[in-house]
Image (cartoon, helix red, strand yellow):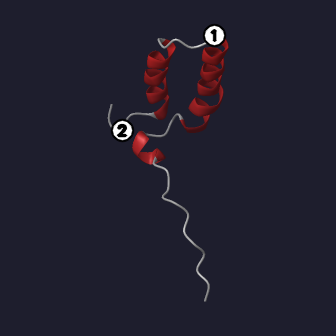
Amino acid sequence: MTSDTRITKLGLIRWAEFGDADRALNTRRRYRDILDNYVSPGVGGLQIREATPPGPPQEPQFP
């Protein structure tokens, strides 16, 4: 995996690890639903390097 890897692929890799974990059936279903219906369509096409979150919020500057 590199910074050029797409978020969808990262999600599928993580899902493979998560799916093997000892989790309740409804938890696995819900997580997969979020991956398929929110993460992949929303940001799945971004590369990891494009999805870096911003730093902490800055204090407002007053004159």
Q: Note whether 1 is above or below 54 in the view shown.
A: above
Q: How far across and how far down the image is residue 11, in percent?
A: 49, 27
Extreme residue in the left direction: 2
Pick the quarter of the image with the C terminus: bottom right
Residue 59, numbered label: none
* Residue beneath the point at 49% across and 18% down: 18
The image quarter in which residue 29 lies: top right
Q: CA distance from mark 2 to mark 1?
A: 32 Å
Q: How many marks?
A: 2
* Residue beneath the point at 67% across and 14% down: 26
Q: Secondary structure at mark 1?
A: helix
Residue tagged 1: 25
The image quarter in which residue 13 lies: top left
Q: Note whether 28 is above or below 40 in the view shown.
A: above
Question: CB of mark 2 within 8 Å of CB of mark 1?
Answer: no
The first of marks 2 and 1 along the sequence is 2
Residue tagged 2: 4
Q: From the viewer's perspective, tell me whether residue 20 is left or right of residue 43.
A: left
Q: Note whether 9 is above or below 19 in the view shown.
A: below
Badge 1 amino acid: Leu
Extreme residue in the bottom direction: 63
Q: From the viewer's perspective, tell me whether residue 53 is left or right of residue 36.
A: left
Q: From the viewer's perspective, tell me whether residue 29 is left or right of residue 44.
A: right
Badge 2 amino acid: Asp
